[in-house]
Image (spheres, helix red, strand yellow):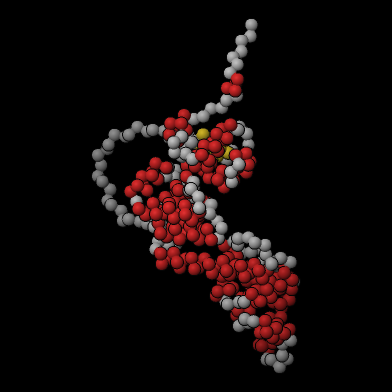
Amino acid sequence: MEYRLDLGLWNQVFAVPCALVDRHLKLAGKEQLQVLLWALRHAGEGFTPGAMSSALGMPEELAEEALEYWTNQGLLAETAEGLCPAPQPEVEAAAPPVASTPPAPKPEEPRPLPPKKRMVKPDTIQLAARMEESEGIRFLMQEAENLFSRTLSPAMTTLLLTITDDYGLPPEVTVMLLHYAQEVGKTSTAYIDSVARDWAESNVFSLEAAETKLQDLSQRRLAWNKVASAAGLPKRSPTKKEEEAARRWVQDWGFTQDMLTAAYERCADNTGKFSAAYMDRVLESWHTAGVLNLEALAAYEEKKKSPPQAKGKAQKASSEKSYDIDELERMSFFDLPDDL
């Protein structure tokens, strides 16, 4: 005889960690619970944040932050194969004290920033405690919510606490950073974290230093926009080398958009594409020769094409050398990978 226990809907079940109910049910937000339950339901199946967000009807960024929340809480871990249950830390027995001569105190060294991928970030309990004891932290969280016009996700709140407590940025400086991120349209936790680390490594710990940093970032952004417009580039973020080159061309050398367009045309004629390295060589030669406008450029190029015949041997050799460089440019000799 065959026996069968029919539990109806309970025939198809999946396991839920007890820690979810014991420790996180009260603290986790709706999106975090939705994402974890959905991931548990599809255990063993491959999925992307995009598929998850589509199934749950939430923005993909929110789904990624929810997954990050559970990895930060130690319930999930990231491996090369994907997500898996996080290993539980082993409790080691305390070693008996050994009598020894205490080492001589070492001079204090600057504390390095935490690793970029932190294993454990502050949890919501620590956050609540910090907000209770620190008016600055409360101010930061309130300003962030007002700026983003939404309730902060657990991933964002723990990141803001990390920025102030671990990276050392004061709350008012962090607020300026958040305004910048909102202005450029990049408010993901990954972007804000990378900017905060850069500010900390650059010693931007005061309002004055933050204002100077923001002015520099604004000028760099405007310089790149001029270059992108001159070259007809699609809207995209520049690489660090491209950004630095654009800043040098516009701010240090003072080239106008007309001159940037002229440099790009010569670059495209010889390489068939935008090359920051090639444009840098062209603009550097113009800068060295004091050529800063189209009229001066026309005269400069005409002079290089027809060197005077009455020059001495040294001058003639110099002219021939200049002519040779022009020939090499036309032969795409400088069509090299960007290595600024």
- Residue at the image position 60 percent from the left and 16 percent from the top: 6
Q: From the viewer's perspective, is residue 175 above or below residue 250?
A: above
Which of the pair 182/260 is nearer the observer? 182
Can residue 52 be seen here?
Answer: no
Q: Residue furthest bottom?
A: 310
- Residue at the image position 71 percent from the left and 77 percent from the top: 326
Image quadrant containing the N terminus: top right
Q: Position of residue 93 (x, y in %)?
A: 35, 32
Image quadrant containing the C terminus: bottom right
Q: Position of residue 98 (x, y in %)?
A: 27, 37
Residue 45 as seen in the image, left or right of residue 271: left
- Count every numbered label the image shows and give the total: 0
Q: From the viewer's perspective, is residue 44 above or below residue 7?
A: below
Q: Position of residue 313 (x, y in %)?
A: 68, 89
The picture quadrant where one finds residue 332 is bottom right
Can residue 138 be seen here?
Answer: yes
Residue 161 as seen in the image, left or right of residue 66: left
- Residue at the image position 71 percent from the left and 80 percent from the top: 323
Q: Position of residue 288 (x, y in %)?
A: 60, 80
Q: Residue furthest top?
A: 1
Residue 288 as seen in the image, left or right of residue 127: right
